Image: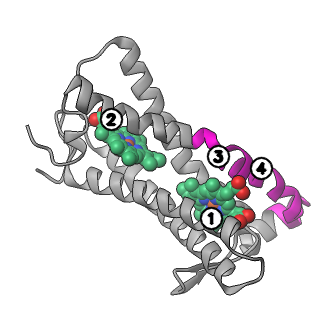
Amino acid sequence: MGIRNNSYDYGSIAKWLHWSVALLFLGSYISVYYRQWFTQEETPENWIALQLHLSIGVTIGALVLLRIFWRLTNPTPRLEPGSRLEHIATHTGHFLLYVVMILSPLTGYLGTGVNTEYFFLFEIPQFADTSFFTNIMQNTMGMTFKQFEEPIDFIHKEVLGEWLVWLLILGHALAALYHHFIKKDRTLVRMTTGNK
Ligand code: HEM
Ligand code: HEM
């Protein structure tokens, strides 16, 4: 297996990026729901769970930038044979997954009113404290953080944070299993072991 993709197979970097982002997605959901369902406000656990959510989310954001760069500079393996409708569904699904992967960290970061203590190693300032927000949005455009945050939070929590994204990921994973066990093609294999 090479590092780069070719028209037949994903290379090791694309696989590594795909599976680490998938795992981090799981981590970001576990941390935020653990916080909401199993911790009390203003306890250390509540804060740690939130900070893990922010740290994992920021990591996803960074990996997704790398992933987009890698996707644009590598060939994308040709889809396995299927109907036109199946191919349109696959392309649409992958496109929507990219939309979610970009918008979730972005809206999370922009709308959050606390600094990110990145895995408790160093601090990333919240967007509201950056000079971009204070100089341009607040001083020049006269916008308060609350006005800015409301629609952004709505997208993060009420649109992307809802079951729609779960359905998308579930559909994507089920499609992979359908290819592997029913169509018996190389779709899952080329994103994992790469066997012939
Ligand atoms: C791919 C990355 C991310 C995913 C999938 C994600 C997903 C979610 C979900 C599902 C919720 C719960 C929504 C609800 O209340 O129903 C949430 C809440 C939240 N997210 Fe994210 N998020 C991501 C990245 C980020 C980032 C990068 C930040 C900030 C740096 C962030 C900050 C927050 C905050 C402050 C909340 C509210 C927490 C609470 O009310 O307990 N998120 N996110
Ligand atoms: C159990 C979970 C998952 C399984 C079994 C899975 C499986 C796969 C497989 C087999 C492919 C290759 C498809 C092809 O060759 O056409 C693929 C591609 C892809 N997957 Fe997943 N995946 C999972 C989770 C996720 C998650 C959580 C995301 C993002 C939120 C994601 C985003 C993508 C994207 C965007 C592609 C297109 C290729 C690329 O640009 O990297 N996957 N996935």
Q: Which residue is mark 3?
A: 160
Left-right relation of 44 to 133: left
Q: Are marks 4 and 2 in contact (CB under 8 Å)?
A: no
Upstream in the sequence, badge 3 or badge 4?
A: 4
Q: Residue at x 76, y 71 (%)?
A: 113
Q: Is residue 117 visible?
A: yes
Q: Name the residue nearer the viewer: 39 or 114.
A: 39
Q: Which residue is mark 4?
A: 154
* Image coords of residue 94 (percent x, y): 43, 35
**Amino acid type of the residue tagged 1 in the rendering:** Val
**Amino acid type of the residue tagged 4 in the rendering:** Phe
Left-right relation of 48 to 67: right
Q: Residue furthest left?
A: 196
Q: Main secondary structure of the magenta part?
A: helix
Ligand 1 within 8 Å of disc 1? The answer is yes
Q: How many marks?
A: 4
Q: Which residue is mark 2?
A: 176
Res 41 quadrant in image: bottom right
Q: Whole-Å distance between the Cαs marked 1 and 3?
A: 13 Å
